[in-house]
Image: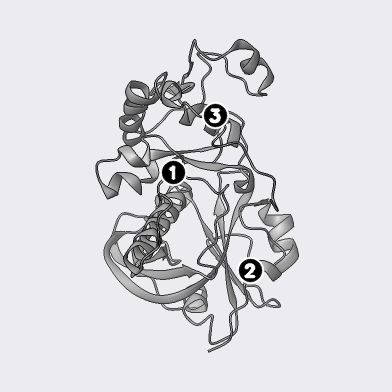
Amino acid sequence: MPRLQLPTDLPFEVGALYHRRQQIHGLLGGQQQGGISTPGNAPFVILFTGEAGSQHSYWDHWEIEDGQNVFHYYGEGQSGDMQDTRGNRAIREHLRHGRRLLMFQSLGKGQPYRFWGEFRCIGTYEHHGVPDTSGALRKAIVFRLKPVEDDFDPFQNKVADSIAPAIDLSATVSQQVQEIRVKQSLFKRRLLLVEKQCRLTGVADLRFLRASHIKPWSKCVSGDERVDGANGLLLTPHADLLFDRGWITFEDNGTLVRSSHLPSEVAERIGLDLTSGRRCGAFDQKQKTYLEYHRNAVFETAFKKFDDPFSELVTPAGY
């Protein structure tokens, strides 16, 4: 089996944005249409995922398997049963042919693509009863893809809540901490399939965003709530702080609500448009359930319980 290279040698940065025609195919070649591109003169198979695929019953999604995050990626073929040919075979045989799988996420028509990193195919299965473009039921080929760099985290090193206390890490505790890390990572990855950018700033580059829970991790009543992508927002760090502490919230229709307790000087200097009533994009039904909790239990409440503003002051790197 060929030795895999870490994605640090690639011409793309994980979380960054690239235009498909000029910056992806212009550099690597390959077909400029479709979800699987196989450049003839470069050792890559380029994969694209995004909401457009759902029109053809491609239900790409993340799951935890054996303590690892695995992406279930639907193969190509819009009509009839999917076949083990062309792009589908290129994915399945990528290791044997020394080709590397690169994943990009579509952010919408006319928008750039977000680089998710390099993946490895660890298996395939068939999903029967999947509608094709005409509505006829057919067989779909689904690839189980694992990120090459398991600990990859394109976000700021924060998940809205402090979870693990400072304790002696016994074997049992170490396992629990690892399980929490995997679940945090699953939440972040699922969030990318729900939210595309910061609702306050429009920033979509993951290197400048945080994955913020709407209903805090510590208040979730089940593991499903904690890893539900609908229970989150992509926010720039200063927007994340305001939302996490309850200085701002959103109505179900996306209307921004600002706390009357937020100092006017801070609101003026923080560099965000915090105009109450500003529309920031509607939410789906699942998100609305979590937002109701945020409005009732976090908004204008969390910052009153935060009595040590020194505890989260940033320490310069290297200290």
Q: CA distance from mark 2 to mark 1?
A: 29 Å
Q: Mark 3 highlights which residue?
A: 309
Q: Mark 2 highlights which residue?
A: 7
* Marks 1 and 3 in Cβ contact (< 8 Å): no
Mark 2: secondary structure = helix
Which mark is in front, 1 or 3? 3
* Marks 3 and 2 in Cβ contact (< 8 Å): no
Q: Is residue 248 above or below residue 311?
A: above
Numbered badge on residue 18: none
Q: Is residue 130 above or below residue 317?
A: below
In the rendered image, residue 268, in percent from the top left (x then y), is placed at 66, 15
Q: Report the front residue among 117 and 102.
A: 117
Q: Report the front residue among 197 and 187.
A: 187
In the rendered image, residue 27, in percent from the top left (x then y), is placed at 74, 65
Q: Mark 1 highlights which residue?
A: 162
In the rendered image, residue 300, in percent from the top left (x then y), is placed at 42, 18
**Mark nearer the N terminus (2 vs 1):** 2
Q: List the single residue furthest toward the front.
A: 168
Which mark is in front, 3 or 2? 3
Q: Report the front residue among 29 and 168.
A: 168
Q: Amino acid at mark 2?
A: Pro
Q: Amino acid at mark 3?
A: Pro
Please tell me how crowded label 2 is: few (under 14), some (14-19), or many (20+) other residues with Cα within 10 Å: some
Q: Report the front residue among 10 and 304.
A: 304
Q: Amino acid at mark 1?
A: Ser
Please tell me how crowded label 3 is: few (under 14), some (14-19), or many (20+) other residues with Cα within 10 Å: few
Q: CA distance from mark 1 to mark 3?
A: 14 Å
User: Can residue 29 be spotted in the picture?
Assistant: no
